[in-house]
């Protein structure tokens, strides 16, 4: 029951409050301090499986280096970072997923991190109108030193040295800070973290610099259609409403405030002093130490937080958020057509046991037979649809819940917007007429309980942040269960909520390039987006209010056949115990057609399995045309499968069908009972599927749109340009578009039989399936594809260019979006190919160099010089060729200046490395060791780690363990020697490629002033003709 020693400090302590899954071995204690701060302490027994260490009086306070803010310490997960996801991986498609940072290949279950998070019940709704973005700015400033730890980068320097990282985000009604670290350094990290909430310095000179970081962050979002729409919704909300403001903050909003005589430091300290108090703070600490020890640390370190009320700031808003009967046409940045319908509902926080909004989202967002999406797709009007109350604060607050239906339209659909809204109201009428169905609620209840019971663990800092945020919304007993629970069936409440789905309560937004040719457009002041506000005709509103008929093809979904009932664990079966302790997959089938790896899970013991396949298709990547035809086929196949795989996904059995590099990648993963059934359905469609003309037209149009939108983000564009130089068979996006325009259905129909005529499949079955079940899964392939195997010489093998000695290459390009202010430089150093016995040590050197350099880079070029919001470095592994890159995105400086600053930093690294004392060097080594030996948090993480080894044809399933062993023998001189070999211009092994993407406010003519030693690549194809390549190994 907690500490006996100092009762006045703790007003409440209990180990029995939190309802947790029967499979959760962690212990939870809820305590409340005298100052009102509520803390959830989590003892994770897997952090120290042999028991926690014995602590010296103070074992955690080393002397510090002059280091920096961890990479994205204040990367806001709120308004600022909501990017559209339609092209999220556009720049990864060419490298076969082989370009991963070290974090992507964790290995060997051995250790887990400790973590903590603080969620403060104050956010952007509390911004003063005269200083908008202040809460977000305050979040940034808390990282910039405290009275006890005055160095600006002290917190992140400490984390960086000890295998840790940090992040934070500002929401409308809360702000969340979180970190993870090697468990033995948890107290030291908490000492630094706690001072955020006790004595931040908020120095004036630091404010002047950090306002530029807020501005750079805003400039990241400036060309995002999703962010522009969100800000338009805020801008056009009722004056005086808490939404009617600018949450991001930028230089203009904050500096203008100062110019108007507002003392920004006084305002920021007032916001802090008024609200950063115990009663509004929810702390989560996850460690391997006993609950008593964790509690003593929290009391010691957070007891000095100012006392404050438990009552959160109240925000009220009478009447509607938006004017009714309006449609807003917003000019898009990308080539998209999106229709968003929004309805204001009452705040539903208190109804979490009933979740009426999730019941309605399930039906309105359904994609199966009879659904709204199925109907709109059949008419060729829509390609995707989502519905529900979003998690962001502008949609889910104490003021209101906003239910949004977002529909991605085709070219013909954008001309039928009002007809589409008519069908939405037909479906809503159907829901009213059929009345709420308890069996549907029961399905959602079963799925929620199943997910809660067998929840997969997340990374520790994500879990800490989620719990701390949940403490703001749910009673303590439901801090975990609250997200999953469907407890009480309330038909009346659903009908009541359905009553808000009326035209008078609806906002209509259309985001499209086909902007109305109207002289009447207005400009949203912060983003400068052009929009038109129009009245919706009264006769349409009347028609929608009560549609005269409901189309017969609209109906409720059928019962879900994919919900499992068998949760038995295979590793518990006595007759297969001989293989339960395997730590690496075994190859159980190695034939000309299929190679199949298998591993029974005995670590997580959950009724889940992950089956992954990569399929070489005959001639699928021979040239640009065949590449485009293969992509078209896969997109059409996904479209054909959508209704089946959507129904399974509701039951948490997921399917992914994608074109990765030159192969079709199929993944079926989730609860294992119905997995073979789903795989059979998917493959029986894939073996004989032939597209129809109507779907061909829609999917071709959608693919054209995706290709047109590729490289709209400068960071994606720079990666694309680098890979275009590195990879031998890299098909240019404009070439692909050119070929796609000339393709017809008959071309595809002639191509598909040949594509399917010879195959080679490599797969992995990992999880809760026996070896016999795994062999049955491989037989599903053989039954559906009784074809000739594709011999190795006909399988595409990607090769990576081998830069000549002393290569100094430059590739320049202008931003694709002519309004994009951000420029990017990527400076890539090619190291060696990942082959041979030395490659493990080489990888350890690369990762250790990254560990040491990442934080000083950020501190110097972002925190001090404020070059831009994105300042990063990272190992790059492209088809098993090692590289290392430095990257900056900036809206303020041109690429020439950015390059000079990066070069200057790299030149100074020898001194930095030389100056590292022995303790600091060992700390970086042990921090990296902890990352390498970190336990996979879930089955999915482990499967992905194993799959990466198969995809790379490395098959060293304990790679990270081997790297950790190699790391033990590396000393400081090795790192310095490695740096001199690959980064010093005088070394023949220093081979570099500089990619520069020039923003709209820079002059490409500046690119011409280059020294003679630099070779400019204007045409990658002709450059590669005369180049050497590494032999293909994967």
Image (cartoon, helix red, strand yellow):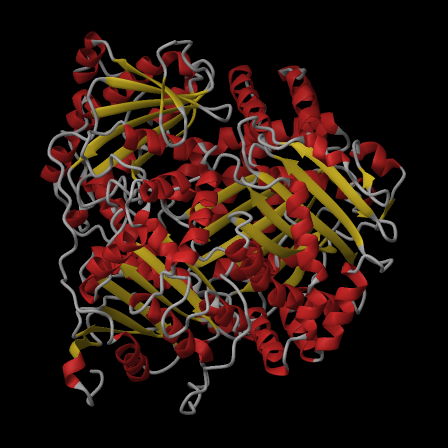
Residue 839 vs residue 313, the one in the foreground: 313
Question: For this view, does 276 lie left or right of residue 101?
Answer: left
Identify the image quadrant of residue 690: top right
Residue in the image at 64% along x and 46% along y: 898
**Residue 203: horizontal and vertical position, in percent?**
38, 61
**Residue 873: horizontal and vertical position, in percent?**
62, 56
Task: Relative to 418, say whether 75 is above or below.
Answer: below
**Residue 518: horizontal and vertical position, in percent?**
39, 9
Residue in the image at 48% along x and 65% along y: 153
Q: Give the tally of numbered discs.
A: 0
Residue in the image at 40% along x and 43% along y: 80
Question: For this view, does 150 lie left or right of residue 483?
Answer: right
Residue in the image at 48% along x and 32% along y: 223
Residue extending furthest right? 1026
Question: For this view, does 64 lie left or right of residue 324?
Answer: right
The image quadrant where one finds the N terminus is bottom left
Question: For this view, does 765 lie left or right of residue 495?
Answer: right
Task: Relative to 412, say whether 556 is above or below.
Answer: below
* Residue 9 visible in the displayed image: yes
Identify the image quadrant of residue 441: top left
Residue 758 vs residue 809, the one in the foreground: 809
Residue 179 vs residue 795, the one in the foreground: 179
* Residue 797 visible in the displayed image: no
**Residue 472: horizontal and vertical position, in percent?**
22, 57
Task: Relative to 681, say whether 460 is above or below.
Answer: below
């Amino acid at each position: 029951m907690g500490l006996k020693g100092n009762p006045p400090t703790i007003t409440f302590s209990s180990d029995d409050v939190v309802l947790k899954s029967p499979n959760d071995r962690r212990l939870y204690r809820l305590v409340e301090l005298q100052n009102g701060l509520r803390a959830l302490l989590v003892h994770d027994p897997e952090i120290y499986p042999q028991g926690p260490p014995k602590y010296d009086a103070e074992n955690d306070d080393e002397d510090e280096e002059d280091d920096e803010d961890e990479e994205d310490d204040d990367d806001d997960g709120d308004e600022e970072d909501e990017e559209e996801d339609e092209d999220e991986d556009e720049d990864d498609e060419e490298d076969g997923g082989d370009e991963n940072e070290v974090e992507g290949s964790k290995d060997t279950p051995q250790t887990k991190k400790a973590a903590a998070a603080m969620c403060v019940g104050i956010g952007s709704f509390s911004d003063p109108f005269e200083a908008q973005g202040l809460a977000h700015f305050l979040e940034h400033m808390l990282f910039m030193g405290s009275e006890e730890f005055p160095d600006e980068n002290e917190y992140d320097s400490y984390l960086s040295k000890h295998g840790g990282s940090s992040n934070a985000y500002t929401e409308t009604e809360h702000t969340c800070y979180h970190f993870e670290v090697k468990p033995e350094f948890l107290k030291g990290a908490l000492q630094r973290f706690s001072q955020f909430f006790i004595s931040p310095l908020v120095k004036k000179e630091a404010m002047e610099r950090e306002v530029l970081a807020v501005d750079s962050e805003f400039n990241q979002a400036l060309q995002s259609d999703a962010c522009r729409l969100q800000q338009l919704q805020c801008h056009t909300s009722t004056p005086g409403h808490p939404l009617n403001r600018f949450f991001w903050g930028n230089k203009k909003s904050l500096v203008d405030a100062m110019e108007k005589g507002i003392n920004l430091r006084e305002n920021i300290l007032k916001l802090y002093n008024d609200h950063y108090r115990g009663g509004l703070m929810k702390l989560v600490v996850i460690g391997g130490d006993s609950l008593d020890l964790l509690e003593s640390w929290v009391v010691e370190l957070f007891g000095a937080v100012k006392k404050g009320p438990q009552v959160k700031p109240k925000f009220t808003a009478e009447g509607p958020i938006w004017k009714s009967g309006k449609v807003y046409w917003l000019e898009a940045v990308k080539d998209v057509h999106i229709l968003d319908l929004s309805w204001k509902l009452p705040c539903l926080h208190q109804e979490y046991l009933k979740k009426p909004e999730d019941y309605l989202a399930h039906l309105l967002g359904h994609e199966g037979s009879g659904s709204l999406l199925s109907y709109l797709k059949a008419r060729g009007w829509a390609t995707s649809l989502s519905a529900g109350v979003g998690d962001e604060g502008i949609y889910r607050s104490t003021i209101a819940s906003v239910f949004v239906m977002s529909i991605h339209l085709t070219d013909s659909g954008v001309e039928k917007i009002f007809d589409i809204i008519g069908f939405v109201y037909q479906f809503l009428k159907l829901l009213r007429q059929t009345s709420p169905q308890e069996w549907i609620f029961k399905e959602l209840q079963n799925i929620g309980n199943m997910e809660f019971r067998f929840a997969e663990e997340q990374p520790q800092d994500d879990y800490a942040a989620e719990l701390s945020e949940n403490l703001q919304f749910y009673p303590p007993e439901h801090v975990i269960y609250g997200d999953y629970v469907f407890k009480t069936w309330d038909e009346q409440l659903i009908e009541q909520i359905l009553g808000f789905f009326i035209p008078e309560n609806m906002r209509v937004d259309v985001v499209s390039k086909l902007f109305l040719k109207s002289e009447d457009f207005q400009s949203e002041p912060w983003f400068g987006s052009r929009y038109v506000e129009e009245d919706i005709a009264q006769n349409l509103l009347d028609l929608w209010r009560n549609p005269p008929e409901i189309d017969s093809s609209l109906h409720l979904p059928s019962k879900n056949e994919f919900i499992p009932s068998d949760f038995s664990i295979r590793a518990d079966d006595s007759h297969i115990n001989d293989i339960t302790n395997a730590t690496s997959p075994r190859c159980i089938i190695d034939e000309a057609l299929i190679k199949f790896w298998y591993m029974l899970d005995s670590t997580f013991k959950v009724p889940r399995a992950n089956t992954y396949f990569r399929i070489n298709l005959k001639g699928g990547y021979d040239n640009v045309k065949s590449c485009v035809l293969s992509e078209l086929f896969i997109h059409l196949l996904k479209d054909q499968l959508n209704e089946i795989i959507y129904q399974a996904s509701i039951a948490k059995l997921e399917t992914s069908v994608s074109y990765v590099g030159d192969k079709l990648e199929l993944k079926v993963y989730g609860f294992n009972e119905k997995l073979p059934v789903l795989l059979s359905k998917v493959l029986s469609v894939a073996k004989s599927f032939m597209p129809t003309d109507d779907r061909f037209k829609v999917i071709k149009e959608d693919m054209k749109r995706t290709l047109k939108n590729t490289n709209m983000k400068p960071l994606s564009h720079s990666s694309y340009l680098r890979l275009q130089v590195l990879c031998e068979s890299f098909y240019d996006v404009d070439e692909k578009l050119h070929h796609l325009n000339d393709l017809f259905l008959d071309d595809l129909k002639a191509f598909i039989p040949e594509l399917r005529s010879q195959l080679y499949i490599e797969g992995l079955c990992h999880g809760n399936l026996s070896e016999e079940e795994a062999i049955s899964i491989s037989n599903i392939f053989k039954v559906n594809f009784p074809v000739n195997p594709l011999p190795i010489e006909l399988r595409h093998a990607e090769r990576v260019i081998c830069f000549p000695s002393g290569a100094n290459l430059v590739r320049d390009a202008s931003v694709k979006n002519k309004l994009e202010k951000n420029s990017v430089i990527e400076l890539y150093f090619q190291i060696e190919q990942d082959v041979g016995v030395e490659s493990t040590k080489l990888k350890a050197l690369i990762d250790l160099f990254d560990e040491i350099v990442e934080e000083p880079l950020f501190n110097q070029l972002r925190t001090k010089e404020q070059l831009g919001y994105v300042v990063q470095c990272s190992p790059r592994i492209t088809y098993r060729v090692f590289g290392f890159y430095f990257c900056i995105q900036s809206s303020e400086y041109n690429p020439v200046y950015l390059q000079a600053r990066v070069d200057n930093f790299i030149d100074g690294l020898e001194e930095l490395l030389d100056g590292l004392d022995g303790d600091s060097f060992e700390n970086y080594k042990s921090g990296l060791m902890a990352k390498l030996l970190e336990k996979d948090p879930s089955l999915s993480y482990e499967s992905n780690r194993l799959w990466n080894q198969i995809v790379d044809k490395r098959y060293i399933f304990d790679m990270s363990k081997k790297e950790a062993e190699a790391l033990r023998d590396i000393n400081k001189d090795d790192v310095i020697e490695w740096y001199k070999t690959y980064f010093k211009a005088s070394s023949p092994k220093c081979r570099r490629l500089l990619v520069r993407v020039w923003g709209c406010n820079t002059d490409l003519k500046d690119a011409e002033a280059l020294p003679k030693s630099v070779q400019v690549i204007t045409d990658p194809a002709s450059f590669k003709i005369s180049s050497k390549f590494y032999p293909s190994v994967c």
